[in-house]
Every structure is written in C-alpha cells, then in structure tokens.
DNA sequence: TAGTGTCG
DNA sequence: ACAC
C-alpha cells in the first residue's frame, strides 16, 4: 500500500506565495529521520564542498548533490554535471523517498507528475547566506522547483521576476517545503544570513534540499 | 550578480 | 537599497 507518511501534515493547505507557488508548513516532518539518514549517506559518497561563483568568490554554503544531474559552479560558470568534479564519479542516487516527497509537494501546488532528476543540497552554518538569484540553469522551466528546509530556521527572500522588486521575507522552519513553478518559476529568491542557533537534530546548521528537473 | 562593498 |  501507499504509506500514510504524509497523513499528519500532507493535508494542510499551502500558504500562497504567488499564483503558482506556495509554502507547505511542516510537510517533510513525518520523514525527518529518514531524510537525515539519506543526507548522511549522500555526503559519504559525495562530500560537502565549497563552490565558487564564476567571478571567483567563494559561496558561504557547503554543497553536494544527488540524482542524475548535479548543480556545479566555478570560473567556467553555472551548470549541471553528470559526474561529481570532486570524485569523478556519478552523483549518488536520488532516494525514492525524496522523489516521492517532491512529487507529492509539487502535486499540492497543482504540478502533476513532477519527476526530479537533480537534488542540490546546501548546508548553511550561522553567517551563511544565499544572494538573490533565479534558477535558470535547467534545460526547461516547465517543471517546478521544490525546496525542503531542515534544521535551523532561515529567512527566505522571495522576490519577483525582476531583480529590482523588493523581496518578501518568509521564515522557513524545519520540515517546511516551498514549491514554485509556472508564472513564478523564474522568481528571484535567496536566503538571508543565517542566525546562530542549535537545532535538536542538526545542531548549528540548516540543510536545504532543492529538487529540480534539470535535464530532458 | 548563487558575490561583496558602500550609501541613505 | 543599490552599484558593480
């Protein structure tokens, strides 16, 4: 049978962030232990590493990937790669558990049959941040973006399609899932500098999982 | 321009 | 908030 892992939070209404985007509060909570185990396994195969922007500046998050495609950044630019530049091996497999979580979350926002082929994992420690940007390295923008928050709370910066629009600040908590697609697919977004704190499971860090359909 | 530094 |  199809498990009821989502029975606790899967039924709550999304908080609207736009016409085709929303926040699912606590959506991933029923899976938290399994998600944390999966992340540990991924990091054993594909270690956390620091990436650099094309301008040569270090990003403040630590990054790894799982799935067919992994997001990578260096002097050459932003792109998806099939092999981990650090190990030369393919990225770890995307856990079925994560695939199902993403599919279910996307479905809640009206995006049916979402199939992630890329999962970017970003680890934030206090002081880390992510500047406003668009997710535009994927081959098509037809599929939505699904973003899972674990660990310390963060202020999500939710902007418009134009960079000059002032972003809203939305607190994201452990277990929250944000989905955006359609007319909201190219919205600028980011994460404000992470405040100090300790999470019961993750300690002084926040891990964000971004699930995307990057390839064909 | 997924960055930092500077100015109201 | 904005310039680069």
Image (cartoon, coloured by chain):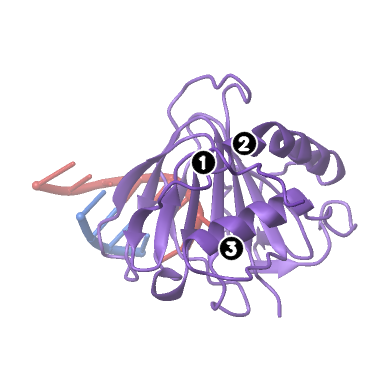
Chain colours: A purple, B red, C blue
| Number of callouts | 3
Give the image quarter of residue A162: bottom left
* Circles 1, 2 touching at the beta carbon (< 8 Å): yes
Instruction: Please tell me whether mark 1 or mark 3 is closer to you in this view.
Output: 1
Q: Which residue sits at x=52%, y=66%?
A: A135
**Residue A202, position as x, y percentages in the image:** 62, 26
Which sits in the foreground, A182 or A66? A182
- Mark 3 vs mark 2, foreground winner is 2
Asked if residue A60 shows in the view, the reply is no
Q: Earlier in the sequence, mark 1 or mark 2?
A: 1
Residue nearest the viewer, comparing A15 with A76: A15
Q: Position of residue B5 (x, y in %)?
A: 36, 45
Asked whether, in this view, residue A87 is left or right of residue A13, the answer is right
Residue A206 - label: none
Measure how far apart labels 1 and 3 are at the Cα level: 40 Å
CA distance separating discs 1 and 2: 8 Å
Q: Which residue is mark 1?
A: A9
Identify the mark at residue A30; answer none if there is no mark.
Answer: 2
Picture quadrant of residue A106? bottom right
Mark 2 secondary-structure assignment: helix
Q: Residue at x 52, y 34 (%)?
A: A174
Residue position for label 3: A54
Circles 1 and 3: CB atoms closer than 8 Å: no
Q: Is residue A197 visible?
A: yes
Q: How many neighbours does mark 3 have within 10 angstroms: few (below 14), some (14-19), or many (20 or more)? A: few
């Amino acid at each position: 049978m199809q498990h009821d892992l989502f029975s606790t939070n899967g039924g709550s209404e999304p908080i609207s962030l736009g016409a085709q985007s929303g926040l699912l509060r606590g959506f991933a909570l029923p899976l938290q232990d399994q998600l944390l185990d999966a992340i540990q396994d991924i990091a054993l195969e594909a270690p956390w590493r620091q990436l650099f922007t094309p301008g040569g500046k270090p990003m403040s998050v630590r990054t790894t990937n799982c799935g067919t495609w992994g997001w990578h950044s260096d002097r050459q630019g932003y792109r998806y790669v099939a092999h981990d530049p650090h190990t030369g091996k393919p990225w770890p497999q995307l856990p079925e558990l994560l695939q199902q979580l993403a599919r279910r979350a996307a479905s809640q926002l009206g995006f049916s049959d979402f199939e992630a082929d890329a999962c970017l994992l970003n680890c934030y420690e206090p002081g880390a941040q992510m500047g406003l940007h668009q997710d535009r390295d994927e081959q098509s923008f037809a599929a939505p973006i699904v973003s899972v928050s674990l660990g310390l709370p963060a202020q999500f910066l939710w902007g418009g399609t134009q960079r000059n629009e002032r972003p809203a600040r939305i607190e994201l908590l452990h277990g929250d899932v944000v989905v955006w697609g359609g007319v909201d697919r190219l919205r600028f977004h980011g994460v404000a500098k992470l405040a100090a704190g300790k999470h019961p499971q993750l300690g002084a860090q926040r891990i964000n999982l971004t699930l995307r359909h990057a390839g064909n």
